[in-house]
Amino acid sequence: MLVGKSILFSLPILNTIINILKWVVPLLIVGYGAYKAYLIAITFYKEAKANEWMLIIRDGKLQSCGVGLSTWSLPGDQVVTFPSTIN
């Protein structure tokens, strides 16, 4: 009889744990996917220092340029930085 009572006592606890996991596991999966997407996207963000020129070249044409430029680039873009000092 003691074993039967302990099983009946543990069933609501197990049910509660399973219900919590039904919500937590999908949230963890979505969060992990968003984190991986962030890591991939951050590789396309480019910044030049305040004393550097940056050129973004796409298909052989200049897309944008500037000193201290910060922008997003596409996977095929050529990004060039060089100092803006005059000698």
Image (cartoon, helix red, strand yellow):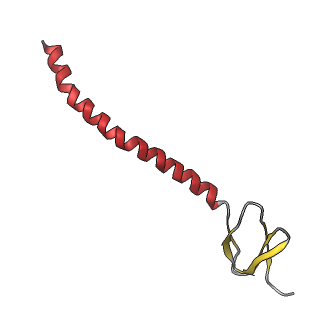
Q: Residue furthest bottom?
A: 86
Q: Residue furthest top?
A: 1
Q: Quadrant of residue 60?
A: bottom right
Q: Is residue 54 visible?
A: no
Tell me where residue 23 appears, x and y as whole percent.
35, 43
Q: Quadrant of residue 45?
A: bottom right
Residue drawn at 60 percent across, 55 percent down? 39
Q: Identify the image quadrant of the C terminus.
A: bottom right
Q: Looking at this view, is 84 or 60 the one in front?
A: 60
Vertical comparison of 13 with 39: above or below: above
Tell me where residue 34 appears, x and y as whole percent.
52, 53
Q: Looking at this view, is 18 or 48 the one in front?
A: 18
Vertical comparison of 9 with 25: above or below: above
Q: Looking at this view, is 32 or 76 the one in front?
A: 76
Tell me where residue 55 appears, x and y as whole percent.
78, 75
Residue drawn at 14 percent across, 19 percent down? 5
Question: In this image, 75 relative to 27: left or right?
Answer: right
Vertical comparison of 25 with 54: above or below: above
